């Protein structure tokens, strides 16, 4: 599926909040656009299932992560989810942030908050960790590594390449740098 969003980059004059941020300096991650995200489990532990025969076989914890990912638009109605894959110890996905559109002829005087990518990913990791701990009392205390990696998808060609990369991830698991069994 293609992206219906416009590929626009605006840079704000705000200073970053913390040093060594993984985010692009000065970029407003709450603005409409498409973002490729990757997040890895704590200590790269294989918690979500196995890659077998070029397909991902999710275990119960992996199924929880998938369900939480799919429910993100219920919590953030201004987002859409693109292609995603959950691997044994990480996940890749595309998040599309859309403009918040006011309803009715007279918009309310208050501005609706446009949640940024960091808030959305924080919520995903928090919600999934909470659900995993409820379902599996023996799950590790920490599920996710701190932070996540992102790439702003700037055009249709990048969108296509990232989409293909995500879909091929289970096929390429043997050679994946995140695979702890990689020779």
Image (cartoon, helix red, strand yellow):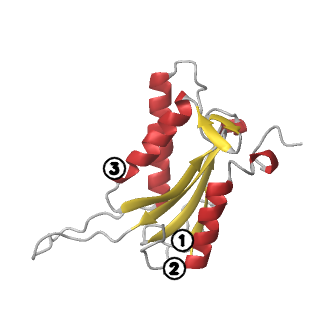
Q: Which residue is mark 1?
A: 15
Location of residue 28 in the rendering, given as x and y in whole percent from the top left corner: 48, 71
Quarter of the picture containing the C terminus is top right
Is 75 positioned to the left or the right of 18 in the image? Answer: left
Q: Residue at x 15, y 73 (%)?
A: 107
User: Disc 3 to disc 1, how far (Cα)?
Assistant: 28 Å
Element assignment for label 3: helix
Element assignment for label 2: loop
User: Disc 3 to disc 2, how far (Cα)?
Assistant: 26 Å
User: Disc 2 to disc 1, how far (Cα)?
Assistant: 11 Å
Which comes sooner in the sequence, label 3 or label 1? 1
Which comes sooner in the sequence, label 3 or label 2? 2
In this rendering, the answer to whether 9 lies above or below 152 is below
Location of residue 160 in the rendering, given as x and y in whole percent from the top left corner: 59, 71
Q: Nearer the viewer, residue 44 or 84?
A: 84
Is 105 positioned to the left or the right of 172 in the image? Answer: left
Q: Which numbered tag is attached to residue 11?
A: 2
Q: Residue at x 42, y 72 (%)?
A: 32
Callout 3: 10 Å neighbours few (<14), some, many (20+)?
Answer: few
In this rendering, the answer to whether 179 lies above or below 23 is above
Q: Which residue is mark 3?
A: 75
Q: Nearer the viewer, residue 63 or 13?
A: 63
């Amino acid at each position: 599926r293609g992206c219906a969003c416009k590929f626009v980059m605006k840079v704000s004059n705000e200073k970053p909040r913390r040093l060594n941020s993984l985010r692009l300096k000065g970029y407003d991650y709450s603005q409409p656009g498409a973002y490729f995200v990757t997040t890895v489990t704590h200590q790269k532990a294989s918690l979500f299932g196995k890659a077998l025969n070029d397909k991902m076989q999710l275990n119960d914890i992996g199924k929880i992560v998938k369900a939480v990912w799919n429910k993100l638009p219920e919590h953030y109605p201004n987002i859409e989810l693109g292609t995603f894959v959950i691997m044994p110890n990480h996940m890749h996905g595309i998040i599309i942030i859309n403009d918040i559109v006011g309803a009715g002829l007279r918009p309310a005087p208050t501005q609706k908050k446009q949640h940024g990518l960091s808030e959305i990913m924080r919520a995903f990791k928090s919600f999934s960790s909470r659900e995993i701990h409820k379902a599996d009392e023996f799950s590790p205390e920490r599920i996710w590594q701190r932070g996540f990696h992102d790439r702003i998808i700037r055009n249709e060609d990048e969108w296509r390449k990232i989409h293909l990369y995500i879909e091929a991830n289970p096929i390429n698991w043997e050679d994946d740098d995140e695979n702890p069994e990689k020779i």
